Amino acid sequence: MKYLVMVLGTQADYEGMRGKASQYSPAWSPVELQAMYDHMGAINDDLAKTGELIDGQGLAEPARTRLVSVDERGEPVIADGPYRESEELMAGYWLLDCASLDRVTEIAARVARCPGPEGLKQYPVVIRPVLDGVEGV
C-alpha cells in the first residue's frame, strides 16, 4: 500500500533554521541543523535500501507558496505568501510503499524523533493512505 508521510512547519520554523529566533520558533545552530539533515538523510537512505521509498522531498518555505482558486465567475484568484508565522503547512514529505499501516507508523515515529533546538514545537507526522483508483471514494 502507498502512503504519504508529511512533516509540518511554519514560516517561523524556516526562519529559525536560518538562525532567526521568534516567539514561534527558536534559532537553530549550524550543529543542530546538520543533526536534522543527518537524521532525515539516514531515514532516506534506509527507506531506499528497503525499497519502500518512492519519493521524498523537503518543500520551500511557506512564504514561497501560491494558492490558486476561482471566483464566482470562474476567474482565477491568485494569492501569494507570506502567511502567518504560526500557520502550519506541509514542510516535506515521503511517498512510501509499505507492507502495512504498522510499518509506516514505525517510520513516522522515527521521523518524529528528529533532533532540533530546545523549545522547538513538535508537530505530528501525518500519514495518509494513497487511494488506488476509485478505492474508498
Image (spheres, rainbow, N blue to C red):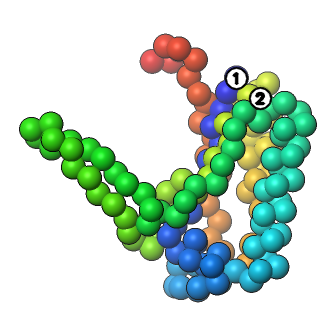
Contact between marks 2 and 1 (CB within 8 A): the answer is yes
Measured along the vertical axis of the image, is residue 114 above or below residue 128? Answer: below
- Closest to the observer, 101 or 67: 67
Question: Callout 1: few (<14), some (14-19), or many (20+) C-alpha neighbours within 10 Å?
Answer: few
The location of residue 11, given as percent across then percent down, is 50, 70
The location of residue 126, given as percent across then percent down, is 61, 46
The numbered mark, 2 or 1, whose residue comes first in the sequence reads 1
Question: Which residue position holds label 2?
Answer: 98
- Closest to the observer, 67 or 6: 67
- SS state under label 2: loop
- Can residue 109 be seen here? The reply is yes
Q: CA distance from mark 2 to mark 1?
A: 6 Å
Q: Is 46 left, or right, of 14 in this rendering?
A: right
Q: Is 33 left, or right, of 86 in this rendering?
A: right
- SS state under label 1: loop
Q: Residue at x 37, y 54 (%)?
A: 66
